[in-house]
Amino acid sequence: MRKGKGNSVCLSERHSQELKRLLSSGLQPVRTVLRALALQQLARGDAIRKVASNVGLTPRTVWLVSQRYQQGGLERALYERPRPGKAALLDAGQRQRIIALACSQPPEGRARWTVRLLAEESVKRKLVPGIGRETIRVLLESHDLKPWREKNVVRGEAG
């Protein structure tokens, strides 16, 4: 990070208009708005420390925004790249087999499936090499299934 005068940014006319439009439009993520304000002030020639105190960011963050603008343009300066995240524990086939198991009849002697029982049975039937209760719970919740609430009871016909 350079000390002293600051890192002035030379915005093109088009980028300047885009920043004005972004700041005058409706709802935007706070990070995007703060970065846009920082870019505008840097383009006016304000020092990094002054911009940081005006906008409420750290000097390092303001410097990084200016660097990202110079290296990758307006999109790169305002928006974050998507983050990879953690790989899914279950593939589509495994998820479908566990859902099918949850929708089937519970084991002999059980009135309903529990999350723990589904996890144990999934491993026993070799649907997955290993799985935790929380993974099963999240999977079922995403499909709006609550087998622990359903009691599979055969009822006689009324009449």
Image (spheres, rainbow, N blue to C red):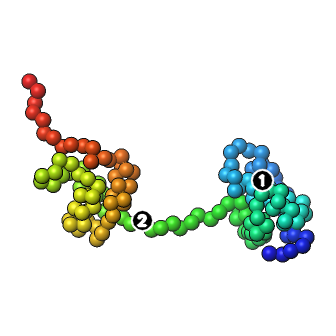
Q: Relative to 47, is 91 on the left or the right?
A: left
- Looking at numbered disc 1 in the image, what kind of residue is underneath it? Glu
User: Which residue is denoted by mark 2 in the rendering?
Assistant: 88
Q: Of all residues shown, which one is farthest toward the top?
A: 159
Quadrant of the frame with the N terminus: bottom right
Q: Residue at x 74, y 44 (%)?
A: 25
Q: Is residue 150 above or below residue 64?
A: above
Q: Which residue carries the number 1 mark?
A: 18
Q: Closer to the observer: label 2 or label 1?
A: 2
SS at badge 1: helix
Quadrant assignment, res 120: bottom left
| Left or right relative to 132: residue 86 | right
Mark pair 2, 1: CA separation: 37 Å
Estimate the x, y position of residue 141 in percent, counting from the top left.
37, 50
Crowding at mark 2 (Cα within 10 Å: few <14, some 14-19, many 20+): few
Q: Amino acid at mark 2?
A: Ala
**Image quarter of residue 45:** bottom right
Q: Residue at 42% of width from left, 65% of height from top? A: 88
| Front in this rendered view, residue 19 or 132 | 132
Is residue 43 visible in this depiction of the protein? no
Q: Residue at x 75, y 56 (%)?
A: 34
Residue 133 at x, y = what percent?
Answer: 32, 60
Q: Which numbered disc flags the more N-terminal residue, 2 or 1?
A: 1
Q: What is the quadrant of the C terminus in the image?
A: top left
Does residue 73 sit above or below 155 in this rendering?
Answer: below
Q: Position of residue 91 (x, y in %)?
A: 36, 64
Q: Nearer the viewer, residue 113 or 102?
A: 113
